[in-house]
C-alpha cells in the first residue's frame, strides 16, 4: 500500500510537466512538419490550437499511466532509487552527458554529408524546440522508455528466466536496457521519415546508432543511479547539442 501511495504522489507531480511537455511537443510538431503536410493535418483538425491541446492531453494520458505503473515496477525490480540528487552522481552524469551532447551535435556535419535533409542548413533552433527537447525528451521519454518499459522488461524477463532467485541477475538488466534502447530508437523512425521524406538503410542505421546507443547510456544511468539521472542526462544531451548548433550554425 505504501508503494501505491508513493506512485500516486509521483504521478501527480508528473501531471503538470506532462501537460506542458505535450503542448510544447504539439507546437514543435507544427514547426517541424512541411507546410503541405501541416495544411493536410489542418483539414482534419480545425485549428492549430486544437492540435496542441490534443497532443498535450495524449501526452498526459500515457505519461500518467506509464509513470504510475513504471514507479511500481521499478520498485519490484530493484530499479527504484532515491530521488534525492547526489553531488558525485550528478557530476558524473553531467560529464558523460556533455560528451554525448557534443557527439550528437556533430550529426549535421557527419551523417548530414550523406543524407539530404539533416545538414547544417536544416537545423532551426526555436524556443519551442529547446523546451520541447528538454522537457519532452528529457522527462517524458525517460518515463516511457526507462521507468516503464525497461522496468517492465526486467520484471517479465526475471519472471520467465529467473523463477527461483529473488535477486535479478545483471544479464537481465543489460538485456532489458538494450531492448528498451532499441525500442527508443525505433520510436524515432516515423518522425525521421516525416522530416527527411524517406527511410533508407543509412537513415535507419543513423537512427539506431544515435538513439539506440544513447538510450543504452540513459538506461545504464537509470539502473545505477535512478530515473532522475537518466532524465538529467537526456536533457543535458539536448541542451549541449542545441548550444553547439546555436554557436556554429
Image (spheres, helix red, strand yellow):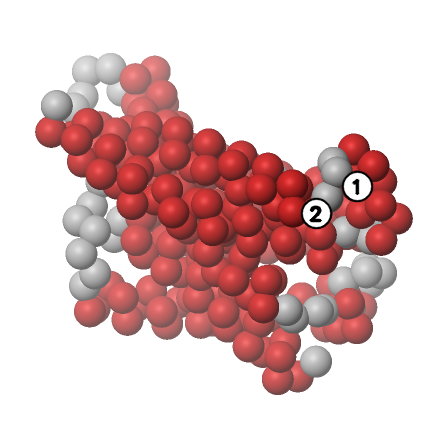
Please tell me how crowded label 2 is: few (under 14), some (14-19), or many (20+) other residues with Cα within 10 Å: some
User: Are circles 1 and 2 on residues that touch, CB within 8 Å?
Assistant: yes
Residue projecting furthest to the bottom: 247
Which residue is found at the position 71% from the left and 40% from the top?
A: 190
CA gap, disc 1 and disc 2: 7 Å
In the rendered image, residue 67, in percent from the top left (x then y), is placed at 35, 36
Which residue is found at the position 34% from the left and 44% from the top?
A: 14
In the rendered structure, the answer to whether residue 118 lies left or right of residue 154 reads: right
Q: Which mark is residue 48?
A: 2
Comparing 171 with 231, the one in front is 231
In the rendered image, residue 141, in percent from the top left (x then y), is placed at 47, 45
Say which residue label 1 marks. 42
Q: Give the mark nearest the N terminus, 1 or 2.
A: 1
Please tell me in which quadrant of the rendered image residue 234 appears.
bottom left
Residue projecting furthest to the left: 2
Q: Disc 1 on helix, strand or loop?
A: helix
Identify whether 85 is placed above or below 39. Answer: below
Amino acid at each position: 500500500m505504501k508503494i501505491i501511495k508513493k506512485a500516486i504522489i509521483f504521478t501527480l507531480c508528473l501531471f503538470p510537466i506532462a501537460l506542458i511537455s505535450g503542448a510544447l511537443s504539439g507546437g514543435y510538431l507544427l514547426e517541424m512538419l512541411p507546410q503541405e503536410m501541416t495544411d493536410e493535418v489542418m483539414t482534419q483538425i480545425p485549428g492549430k490550437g486544437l492540435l496542441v491541446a490534443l497532443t498535450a492531453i495524449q501526452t498526459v494520458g500515457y505519461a500518467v499511466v506509464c509513470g504510475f505503473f513504471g514507479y511500481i515496477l521499478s520498485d519490484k525490480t530493484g530499479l527504484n532509487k532515491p530521488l534525492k540528487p547526489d553531488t558525485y552522481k550528478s557530476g558524473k552524469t553531467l560529464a558523460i552527458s556533455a560528451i554525448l551532447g557534443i557527439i550528437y551535435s556533430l550529426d549535421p556535419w557527419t551523417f548530414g554529408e550523406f543524407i539530404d535533409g539533416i545538414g547544417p542548413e536544416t537545423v532551426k533552433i526555436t524556443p519551442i524546440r529547446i523546451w520541447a527537447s528538454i522537457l519532452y525528451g528529457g522527462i517524458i521519454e525517460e518515463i516511457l522508455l526507462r521507468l516503464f518499459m525497461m522496468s517492465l522488461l526486467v520484471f517479465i524477463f526475471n519472471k520467465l528466466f529467473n523463477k527461483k532467485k529473488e535477486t535479478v541477475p545483471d544479464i537481465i538488466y543489460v538485456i532489458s536496457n538494450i531492448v528498451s534502447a532499441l525500442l527508443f530508437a525505433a520510436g524515432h523512425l516515423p518522425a525521421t521519415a516525416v522530416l527527411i521524406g524517406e527511410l533508407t538503410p543509412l537513415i535507419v542505421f543513423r537512427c539506431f546508432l544515435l538513439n539506440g546507443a544513447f538510450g543504452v547510456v540513459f538506461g545504464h544511468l537509470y539502473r545505477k543511479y535512478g530515473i532522475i539521472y537518466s532524465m538529467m542526462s537526456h536533457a543535458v544531451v539536448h541542451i549541449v547539442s542545441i548550444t553547439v548548433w546555436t554557436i556554429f550554425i
